[in-house]
Amino acid sequence: MSEDPAPYCALAEIADTNPDTLPASTHASDRIRYVDLSAVNEGFIEWNEVPDLRFSEAPSRARRVVKAGDVLFGTVRPNLQSHGYVDALRWNAVVASTGFSVIRAKEGISHPRYLFHCALSEQIRLQANRNAVGSSYPALNDSDVRQFRVFAPVFREQEKIAEVLDTVDTAIRQTEAIIAKLKLVKQGLLHDLLTRGIDANGELRSPQSHAPHLYKQSPLGRIPKEWEYKPFGELCESSAFGPRFPSDAYDENGPLATLRTTDMDDEGNISLSTMPRAAITPSTFADHLLRPGDIVISRSGTCGVTGVFTGHDIPVVPGAFLIRFRLRDPRLNAFYRRYFNSALGRPLLARLAVGGVQKNIKGSDVLNLVVPTPPPAEAVGIAERIEASERDIDLNLRVQAKLNREKSGLMDDLLTGRVRVTPLLEAAATS
């Protein structure tokens, strides 16, 4: 292969796509590890999901012997993107399902990690979707995979491209680990804040086991002494179900927006951009219009999801499957959103749901529900601590999204030859 320009070629020219299979004489009692499509997720093989089987117990499709450095390429839709890299063998005998094509680098000609990144590229994805045939489960065969056209620079350039993409992958995995840890921390913090609260210094109170004198008994269990408990209705100025109107009233240019249960995620975050609009004069539903700070709780479907409306450019009414609550003291709004969406409050709302197939919550039952009531200043502090934790998560999610965009751009440039890494190789050679 010439140095410049690097050619495109069929995958079979730089990789082996027809690896060994287990011999038919394999003893029935011999043990193997079997990698199925379900064990491959987002480019990784979940080795803890790879079963240890006697050969006699293995499915008939468990035939392909796997080696370190192999790329497993899913060939059956919807698994045409279920590709994994065998970084090392954990056991002596590992075989893969025939639902994979096994791509193995040719020594000195192709780099295994380069082949892995090629397998995940947009170019290969398009070829795989185009070539898959079949009605119920469109699939590829090994011959299709061998014919994939790939950019095939010299080995040293493949190695450098793989190094660049692996570096970005490592940063993505590290960010994912940070996000997972922050989410666990948030869950623990949420429970502590909603059961222990914060003291005058803004610090979590000592737990009950260390300072029982800081807590008192209530119908909800032990709560901080400074807290009260009362029916939720005593905190509300008013409440109302969302109004109904005919489906033909919806109009993308209408002057009224409708907040639906589907416009809120499970933590009550509201998406203003997805709310449909209606050709209805807002004054028609003047008593139902949401005000900034109103609490909305889903009463049907996924019962108990709680959000706080923060305002919109046009008037908004809650949908028919939401109940609107307006608190006398708006400083408590964010606290109750967190409480009702938590592992403490959500089950209380869920138990109020009645009915057969489609359960519903009655607004009167929510108003009668006994809830903890911290002092307003403390409620604000609790909500702010939770929001600060979420900001850390959101920051890392934005970092993750940026890294994913960078990786996508790099793959598009480097795996097509649009951008060459030759200068990096030259720099390495002279250093």
Image (tube, helix red, strand yellow):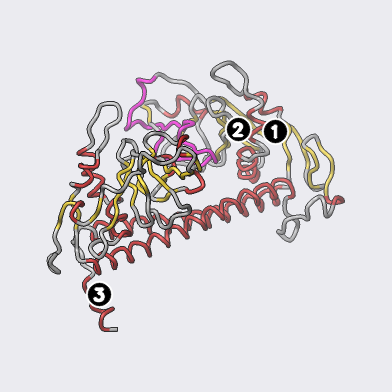
Q: Is residue 260 magenta?
A: yes
Above or below for 231 versus 193: above
Q: Determine which residue is flagged by label 2.
A: 325
Please tell me which of labels 2 and 1 falls first in the chain: 1
Would you name the residue on which mark 3 appears? 425
Residue 124 location, x and y as percent? 24, 48
Question: In the image, what residue type sits under mark 1?
Answer: Phe
Residue at the image position 32 percent from the left and 31 percent from the top: 252
Secondary structure beneath label 2 = strand
Distance of label 1 from label 3 (alpha carbons): 68 Å
CA separation in Å, label 2 and label 1: 10 Å
- Quarter that holds the C terminus: bottom left
Q: CA distance from mark 2 to mark 3?
A: 65 Å
Please name whichever residue, 269 or 46, is drawn nearer the observer in this view of the structure: 46
Residue 5 placement, left or right of 346: left
Answer yes or no: do the residues labelled 2 and 1 have beta carbons within 8 Å? yes
Residue displayed at 62% across by 23% down: 353
Please identify, in this view, whether the residue under mark 1 or under mark 3 is nearer the observer.
3
The local crowd at label 3, few if under 14, some if 14 to 19, many if 20 or more residues have their Cα within 10 Å, is some
Q: Amino acid at mark 2?
A: Phe
Identify whether 148 is placed above or below 69: above
Q: Residues within 10 Å of mark 2 (few under 14, many from 20)?
A: many
Residue stretch rendered in magenta on the structure:
247-275
Residue plotted at (66% across, 51% down) = 382
Amino acid carrying mark 3 in the image: Leu
Labels 2 and 3 touching (C-beta < 8 A): no
Q: Mark 1 sits on what residue? A: 232
The residue closer to the viewer here, 21 or 351, is 21
* Residue visible at 46% across and 45% down in the picture: 33
